[in-house]
Image (tube, helix red, strand yellow):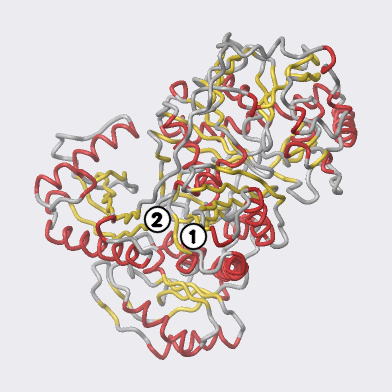
Amino acid sequence: MARRIRIGIDTGGTFTDVVALDEDSGDLVTTKTPSTPGNPADGFITGVEKVLALMEATGADVTSVSHGTTVATNKLLEGKVERLGFVTTEGYEFLLEIARQAVPDGYGNSYFWVKPPRIVPADQVRTVGGRMDYEGNEIRPFDEAGAVAAARWFRDRGITTIGVCFLHSYADDRHEVAMREVLRREHPEAVVSISSEVLREYREYERAMTTLVDAAVKPSVSRYVANIHERLDAIAPGVPFSIMKSNGGVLSADEVVHQPITTVLSGPAAGALGAGLVAARAGFPKVLTCDGGGTSTDVSVVLDGEPTLTTEGTVGAYPSKIPMIDVVTVGAGGGSIAWVSPEGTLKVGPQSAGADPGPLCYAKGGTEPTITDAHVVLGRIPPHLLGGEIPLDVDAARAGIDALAERLSLDPVRCATGVLEISAWNQANALRQVSVKRGLDVRDFMLATFGGSGSLLACRLVDILDLAGVVVPRDPGNVSAFGLLTVDVKNDYVQTMVARHASLDLAAVQKTFDELTDRAAAALDAEGFPRDRHRYVRTVDLRYFGQAFEVRVPAPDGGAGPVDAAYAGAVADAFHAGHRALYGYDFAGDPTQQVEWVNLRVTGIGPITRPQLRDLPSRPEAHFPAAGAASASSDRESLSDPGGPDRGDRSKTTTRRVCFDADAGYVQTPVLWRPDLRAGDTFDGPAIVEEFGSTVPVHPGFRCEVDRLGNLVLTRTERGGDR
């Protein structure tokens, strides 16, 4: 009898993480395999084959595969955008040049701010006559002859990726659709994105940029998805294959090629969802997530199990005004390079050694010390990865740190701890961006750490930010892949409809909501969800008249009811409350301050069955004697043992010399194998908890408790550190 196995695969910079769920037994199996940057599909397929072998299963047992990919993200972050054309309304050819007056990180010490390079050079922009107004009325007819000339111009120059954004096409898209038909006829090789399908929302620059980003990543995403789909079919013919979206939902791979921009934060979104689910079930409603990988660290906010969303995100230098989980990324991953500035100061990142060649300790040709090398030298991670599968070259790491320390005239131990201190403050600043800058009090929040390197600086982050504590899920290196098994199908639809609240056309609002709901329903139908399982959530963007930006609020009871005066009043009340929560004030009850409705939104949701988190067995004794469990025979210097203990030797606690503080130096520290821990076990730092895909250093002054779900919960037993 065939089994029913769902697989989640998240591709990271260093490793591809895999989680498989046996839906009949409820068993979860996790594993990792090195990523293959040259062709990420190779690592994906290797991961599928590896997890099926571990489960003694075949492709016939697989019922679905969900994937978090970085293809679109890396394309934009690396700036490797292929030749791109842009078609816009006549007279607006410099729309991208005008852009916005938004200076990143303030002016600093610079007298001038140079805008980032255009995604489309000015000489690859064509304009076409015709004009709509903001209400969708045609002012000038579409210039068919001009459209043909533009299409032929791109064809003759071999520009095969084109974005189309006409003025006010969010109100009426007839001219954009006509332009696409001309391109199909005159330039059939072209890949085309039109703004009315990518983002049906006003603000011309953001809509144009979002459309161009969609077009820019469409060829790469299409090739990648087609490659994986073909190779996956050879293993599990006809298996449903879905891609994680930035908004916290998934979409079938066949549809994703038409909406590639929705995947720009695919991996980080899955991690935030997975960590949010684990933290909520562990009883932590307010959580900051910290997803540490080989190249970067992603942080986000999760409230009551749901990550916060934004439409003001950017990927690299490019604004992307699509619904996405509010994630801030900082170049502080395990492969981030430590270097000396021209002024002679120590810097860490954002440059990264990546997966290839990687840190010095990988012995794959790396030439500069990294965060991982500092951890190895200080003994905070073992001299191997993946439970001994990948040995590390400790001597190479030490030589790199020694050379860096000599350049800085520092003791090597102080140099290594300095590298980690800078990395911790970089991560702390990213966490402040998603919390303190959003008006949240971080002292009320737990920090959920995951990813291969996410937990390495957890205790230091508690000190810096004065957090409530840390929760480390089971198999933290695979939380993003686990998150892919918890994700509903989700599609977002928006329509700009600017109107004063006092003169709101309730029938028009109802009609727009109904049209958006019909589009959401059609998409869920195509994904195979019966109508009785569809869920729809309405939200509205509002502002006070004269403001430039909006506050998004949920409609009453998810928005399913008829739009009448009471319904509209409830939306306005929610706006006043939301404005006060964000900015500390509101104008409720002030007749001189009018509320303005701006955008109507509908999200269509197709729910899936989420994995059940099983309780971890407990042991008879209430206290796990970590500090005294190591015998003299197991006391050894792990830094001189690059192979490390194999997985069969982990039933006994060992020790190794670890440096948590440069002043205190190295201390003999218990090393625990996490699979041996049981619910209710508690121990005080210093200690190191190791497992197959991750390591958790428990600093002096911290206590670790294993909760009923197997999470490690770290809290301070004494005050300390800088805040």
Q: Position of residue 68 (x, y in %)?
A: 55, 53
Q: In this view, does 587 lie above or below 77?
A: above
**Would residue 79 appear left or right of 587 to someone viewing this image?**
right
**Distance from label 2 to label 1 (Cα)?**
9 Å
Whether residue 96 appears in this view of the structure is no
Q: Position of residue 75 (x, y in %)?
A: 62, 60
Residue at 54% across, 38% down: 299
Whether residue 67 appears in this view of the structure is yes
- Front-most of 164 and 40? 40
Q: Is residue 670 above or below residue 329?
A: above
The residue positioned farthest toward the left in the image shown = 565
- Front-most of 602 and 480? 480
Q: Where is residue 466 in the image (x, y as percent from the top left)?
A: 53, 19
Residue at 26% across, 62% down: 516
The residue positioned farthest toward the front in the image shown = 1
Q: Residue tagged by mark 1? A: 242
* Three-letter residue code for mark 1: Ser
State if disc 1 and disc 2 touch (CB < 8 Å).
yes
> The residue tagged with tag 1: helix, strand or loop?
strand
Q: Residue tagged by mark 2? A: 489
Q: Position of residue 237 (x, y in %)?
A: 55, 68
Quadrant in which residue 454 is drawn: top right
